[in-house]
Image (cartoon, rainbow, N blue to C red):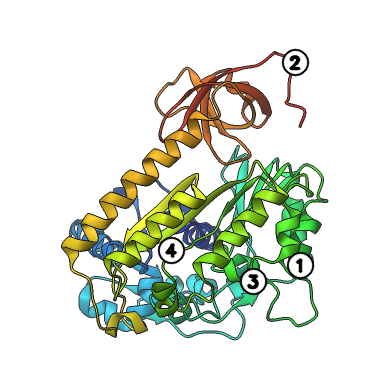
Amino acid sequence: MERKKLYIQTFGCQMNVQDSEKAANLLRLSGYEATDDPQDADLIIVNTCSIREKAAQKIVSQLGRFRELKARNPRLRIGVGGCLAQQWGGGFFRKAPYLDLVFGTHQIHRLPEMVAALEDNRGRQVQTDFCDRVASLAMLARPEAGAVGTFVTIMQGCDNSCAYCVVPILRGSEQSRPLPEIIREVNLLAGQGIREITLLGQNVNSYGKTDAGGPDFTDLILAIGEVARIERIRFTTSHPKDLSPRLIASFGRVGALCEHIHLPVQSGSDRVLKRMNRGYSAEEYRRKVGALRAACPEISITSDVIVGFPGEEEQDFAATLALMEDVRFDNLFSFQYSPREGTRAAGMDGQVSDETKRRRLQVLQALQADHTLRKNESRVGKIEAVLVDGLSKNEPAEITGRTRQNRIVNFPGDPGLIGTTVAVKITQAFLHSLRGRREGQGGEYVH
């Protein structure tokens, strides 16, 4: 019997990527196999993001293109999931009348029955209710064949109330997976050849807080650090207010924990941070960065910044630039503030003009580009441990991987090295990557 074809397009964060992999695994059991070509598909699923307005616009535009495929193939079914589906619910059918199913962030596990209902011609399907427990959290996402690293979702939702953020509205309150369940998954992945694990959660370092007296995030890091064959541990995204002294001390002590942390600051102005309801001051953030560097001098620190938050004045923006000069981030993800429906910030006074936001973003990104390039140039001449994960995108004769500080390195080498960690001497630095040559030919790097 010929299997039906499934095409999934994912927008947004790595948690959405994980959710898409889980959806594909579920539908594989219902007779669907993945295809890379939407024109071959019997079922198209778009896993959506709603964190910024531009993402929502891209999704609606993409759905319009899929509508043309359905006009040529009436048997094609189209569904949407993820945050935008959670936000719009059944209203999605008014915006895109050609849709067949809509499922929310807590309803991935119901996909097989929803698709079966479509196949039985029982009409459009919509499920966007929240559940006491998110069943999909416990589902395994199958890594790609030959993958060196993969992601493990350890929690979902958020109990913070940042004024600009839709996550608590669209993902619900925090739910943490049991530690033994996570360790079983990590052991399984290690047995499949995975060398690097990235732990995922909307507020990953608050893991376990909803279970008073139970294991916390540092306990989880320590437990994964004991799993044989897992060479590297990373995590994203963390919140500064939940960065405990015990977690800070883990850097440099847990051998598998990489010397890198993504620690979103969002603004360097105390006034703006208070309006955002972030729960820390700029000085507290600086102190935590200092403690991280004291515990692990080689640590790479990346961050997020929002420019043009309501009420942000020139002196507030200047405070953000000053914090960047003090901290010297290794890299920075920066965005113009985008009002999101249902958030407190959307109704705040002092909305900043688009022109001012664009100007500030350009200034900020130029400063960060200088800092990033200087950081990368400081690695020239050093020998780095590079976990090789594939072929170079730009040079087919080269292979690529990442340092423990999460820098991309391209260098000449045999594809047979994929999955191993080798010593590479850095010879050139660019804004987005490093280039080097392999040191010695004695096999794997000894860390």
- Write down the residue under mark 3: 206
Q: What residue type is labelled 3?
A: Ser
Tell me the distance, in whole angstroms, between the alpha carbons under discs 3 and 2: 42 Å
Tell me the distance, in whole angstroms, between the alpha carbons under discs 2 and 4: 47 Å
Tell me where residue 90 sits by quadrant.
Answer: bottom left
| For residue 235, above or below residue 168 | above
Position of residue 52 in the picture relative to residue 17 (left or right)? left
Q: What residue type is labelled 2?
A: Gly
Q: Earlier in the sequence, mark 2 or mark 4?
A: 4
Circle 1 crowding by C-alpha within 10 Å: few under 14, some 14–19, many from 20: some
Residue at (55%, 58%) from the top-left corner? 25
CB atoms of marks 1 and 2 within 8 Å: no
Helix or strand or loop: what does disc 3 sit on? helix
Which mark is in front, 3 or 2?
Answer: 3
Helix or strand or loop: what does disc 4 sit on? loop
Q: Which of marks 3 and 1 is nearer the N terminus?
A: 1
- Write down the residue under mark 1: 179
